[in-house]
Amino acid sequence: MPSFASLTALVAAVGLVAASPVSLEKRKAFTVEQVEKGKFIRNGAASVASTYLKYGKAVPANIAAAAAAQGSVAASPSDEYDSSYLCPVDVGGTTMELDFDTGSADLWVFSSLQPSSQTAGHAVYQASSSKVKSGYTWKISYGDGSGAAGKVYADKVVVGGVTATSQAVEAATSISTQFQQDTNNDGLLGLSFSSINTVKPKAQTTFFDTVKSTLAKPLFGVDLKYHAAGTYDFGFIDTSKFSGAVTYVDVDSSQGFWGFTASGYIVGNGTQSSTSIDAIADTGTTLLYIPLAAVKAYYKEVSGAKLDSTQGGYTFPCSATLPDWTAIIGGTKHTIPGKYINYAPISDGSSTCFGGIQDDSDIGQSIFGDIFLKSQYVVFNGASTPKLGFAQQ
Ligand SMILES: Cc1noc(C)c1CN(C)Cc1cc2n(n1)CCN(c1cc(N)ncn1)C2
C-alpha cells in the first residue's frame, strides 16, 4: 500500500511515432548561414530538408522525420490508485518503465551496479565502462524522503521515437526502500529545468532539454488520465486530447520547477475564493497539496472528513460524495471532478479513504500533482520564455 504522506506519480506506455513532414511549400529565398569551422550544425537534417525545399523537391521521410522530431509515449498508472504513472523508454537498448517527473531533472535507472537483491523483477540498465562519464556522480532526494545515487553514463535514449543520441543516463548504485518496494518502477525521467540536475562535477541536461532543438516545437504535452492510460506528446500539441482552448500562464523557473500561479479556487458550486496559490506542476507528485485554509474549505463540504494524524492527512468515508474542485488559472476555470479526489483506502479493504487534496504546510510550496493534472491536458512549453498551458480534458 502506498504510504499516504508520500508524494509521487508516473507513466507507462506503448510508443507511437509521428514525424511531421517539413512544409513542402517552395522556398523563394534561401539564406545559407555560415557556420564556424568545427561547429556542428544544430540540426543537419533540417538544413538538408531546406535544401530539398529550395529546389522544390519532396523531403524524404527519414530526413523530414529527423528534421522535426515529434512523438508520443503512453502513460499508464502503476497501480489501481494512480499513485504513479510509468512510461516505457529505450535506454541503451533496454526497455525500462520510467516515472516521468516534471518535478525533478535527473534521468536515473535501476542498473547492473546495484546488488542483484535490489533489481529482481526490474528491467536493468547494463552499465558499460565504455560509456561511463568518468568521475561523474549523482545523488537525489525527493519530497517524500525517498532517494537514489550512482554513477553517470552517456547512452542513446529513445522516447516514443524521439532519440537523444548521447543522453546522461544516471545508473543507480543505491536506492531507498521506497524504490526497492516499488516493483513496477525502473527509474525516473526528469522533466523539470536542468538547473536542478544533481550530477557532479557538471550538471547534465534532461532528456527534453537534450532533444528540444530537434523537436518540431520546443514543448511537451501531458495527458494523464483517471484510472487509465494517457500520453506524453513531445514536440507537438494533440488537440484531440482536450476540449476548448489552452490557457497559457507565465512560468517561474527560478527554483528549477514549472512554477505558476492560480488566482483563486472554487469548492463544488460555491463562491470563488480569490486566494492566489503559487504552485508547481509536478507529475512526480501523486496528490494535490494546497494551503491549509483551502484544504479546510474543501473538506468542510465532505461528510465524515477529518484530519487523521495517524494517517498523515485528511480522510473520509470511502462512500462520501465529493465536491469538484476548481482552480482559476489565467482567468479560466480548470476543474477536478469530485471522484478524482478519492485517492485510495487507507489500507486494503478499509472503508476509510485518503483524500487527494492535502495540506502543503510541511512542504513549503503548493504542488499541483496528478490528482489535478489528470483533469487537464497540460502544455509544458520550453521556449526561451517558458509557459504552461492548461486545457480541460
Ligand atoms: C508505487 C507508489 N505508490 O505510492 C508511491 C509514492 C509510489 C512510488 N514509489 C513508492 C517510489 C517513489 C517515490 C518517489 N517516486 N517514486 C517518484 C519520485 N518521487 C517524488 C517526485 C516528485 N516530483 N516529488 C516528490 N517525490 C518520490
Image (cartoon, grey):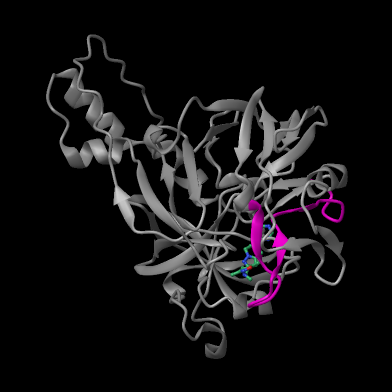
Q: Position of residue 361 (x, y in %)?
A: 87, 51
Residue ID at (29%, 48%): 17
Q: Position of residue 290 (x, y in %)?
A: 78, 46
Left or right of 180 on screen, residue 55: left
Residue ID at (49%, 38%): 393
Residue 56 sits above or below residue 135 on the image: above
Find out whether residue 16 is within the magenta segment: no
Q: Nearer the viewer, residue 190 or 66?
A: 190
User: Does residue 199 show up?
Assistant: no
Left or right of 29 on screen, residue 386: right
Residue ID at (50%, 58%): 227
Q: Quadrant of residue 75?
A: bottom left
Outermost top residue: 28
Q: Which residues are magenta?
A: 341-365
Residue 176 sits above or below residue 275 on the image: below
Residue ID at (50%, 77%): 111
Find out whether residue 349 is within the magenta segment: yes
Quadrant of the frame with the N terminus: bottom right
Residue 3 sits above or below residue 36 on the image: below
